[in-house]
Amino acid sequence: MNKTKIAGVAAFLLVLYAVVPWGIAASGRTDFFYTLTSVALLSIASAGVWLTFYIGRINIGQGAYALAGGYVSAVLITQYGLSFWLTLPLAGLFCVLLAVLIGLPILRLRGVYFAMVTLVLTEVMRLTALALPITQGAKGITSIPLPGELSLFGITLIPDFASLENPKIGFYWMAVTFMVIAYAVLWRIVNSRLGHLCRSLQQNEELASSIGVNTAYLRVVAYSISSFFGGIAGASFIAISQSIYPSSFQVNDSVNFMLNCFLGGLGYVLGPMLGTLMLYFGWDLLFTTGKYQLLIYASLLIALMLALPNGVLSLFDKKKA
Amino acid sequence: MEQIIVNGLYLGAQYALIALGLTLIFSLMNVLNFAHGQMYVLGGFVTYTVVAEFELPFIVGLFISAITLAVVGALIEKYLFRPVIKKSRREESTMLLAAGIAFFLDAVILLVFGEKQRGVPKIIDGALNWDFIVVMPYDRIVIGFLAILLIVAFILFMQLSRAGRAMRALAQDKVAATLMGVAVDRYSMIGFALGASLAGLVGGLLVTITGINLGMGGPASIKAFMMIMIGGAGVISGAIAGGFILGMMESVGLTVLSEYGNLTYLVIFASLMVFLAFRPQGLMGKPWG
């Protein structure tokens, strides 16, 4: 069992780092680099949402943290001249701080109440970005420089993106690496003591607290990790698009992050990744159908829900049983 | 000052009507209907088609819009929500379905009615002018009163009719209601149809004043979510209170904060979050809904 798992992970990494770039180079569809980079980054944000599902909360507010992370990175780069690689963890940490402040009161809510508050949170963040002077309102922050060189003791770890002949491939590598790290972290959390405690929260919060689980603390921890993922994803996105507007992440994006988790399956760590890939790629592939794009997409979504209400990955459950 | 209150009441009556449908669906089935805003837009377009293209009287349009949406709602409940709720391991899965339906309705509206802003001619011309203290066009007054009339009719239906009593029982305790012989499936369907047709009615009412376009669905859903959060999810009195409170806050905010631009909604959202931190279940909701 363990060997097959390691083999699976190795195969997955091989596909990500070798087969996909080779396939794209062979087919000449370089636009897929951008699509796959977006999928990788969005799936990091979805991984965060999935973690809040894991403690039994429906999070439709990830767009708020992606936006906050993006703005922190953009402001630090353009106005304080920091390197992108330094702003990335700072954006994540800012989101953690924000998540603790906001999470402490709202994590007391449950079910649809929490879902609706987080939905509103996305809208609050957008309006805040419009109103604050530092974010430059509706004009947004544009022409953010590409990520520079990252070196340690004189050894270049990551070359300057502007000097790359094809920054798209660079971004692909970056996004995929982040995604692998994020899912490794997620997998580690789920299979740790923290993960067990989170599962107890998901099943019955009163019972968990009555046997001594510090539910309030755990909720905030899980929510902060989730927001950290959101902030990182947002900041990386800004580096690629080199611009940010209050409308960069809005309610639709937040809803999509949540849908990714549902589609892949709430009970599986890799669920959000698969969900993101399917939703984003499906939407892209249907582009050729023109005005029927949304109709077909929505019908497929509904059909998929009717056939597999527990997520696509639940297909593999039945085989085992 | 008087003008602000009148505007707030007028807005509140329509908002309450939207929130009523949403809260009815939520209380019966524990489904957060993301597609509610789209249903409202669909109702507006149906009314537009009947009134502007077929040149029938406005009341007929309103009626047809309510019927259409009721049928759509019943079909959605029977063929989409019911099987998914039965098969799904976690009841939140219905949210994906609801969002899918929202996309679907958006697509259908786009294909059938196009993306243009549509409106019907005013039903009554002129405006009430009371010494320039309160100025209100007559059609807004009529629409406001129609909305209040519909709210009263809805409450009477829920309180006095047999179906209303069954639905209230289901909302209170599903298991107990089933044991007492309430047909859960049938009343869930009626409830969903009723909620959808309320959304259609509001859409029909508003098409005479603000017109209707495809983009109005999403924001309408968010507003409706806020109203039922203020009042408490799944409680009818709460939805009405939430609707009027939001209408009043919007009316006051737009007047007081007009110099600061987009600040009104930021203030409303922020105060809502503070309010929910102290009272998570809203004004009248059951704790932990």
Image (tube, rainbow, N blue to C red):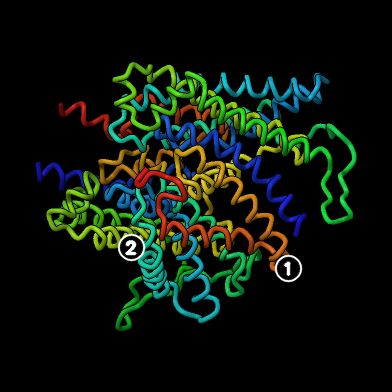
**Among the 4 quarters of the image, the one containing residue B140:** top right
Q: Residue at x 16, y 45 (%)?
A: A7
Decide which of B41, A82 is in the foreground and name it.
B41
Query: Looking at the image, is B127 positioned above or below residue A92?
Result: above
Residue tagged 2: A224
- The answer to whether B26 appears left or right of B63 in the picture is left
Q: The C terminus of chain B lies in which quarter of the figure? A: top left
Q: Nearer the viewer, residue B23 or A309?
A: B23
Disc 2 versus disc 1: nearer the observer: 1
For badge 1, the amino acid type reads Glu
Distance between the alpha carbons at the discs numbered 2 and 1: 36 Å
Q: Secondary structure at mark 1?
A: helix
Residue A32 visible in this rendered orientation of the protein: no
Residue depicted at x 47% and y 31%: B25
Q: Nearer the viewer, residue B46 or B144?
A: B144
Residue A281 lies, in percent from the top left, at 45, 40
Query: Along the line of sight, which residue is nearer the eye, A187 or A13?
Result: A187
Please identify the quadrant where the N terminus of chain B is shown. bottom right
Q: Position of residue B70 (x, y in %)?
A: 57, 22
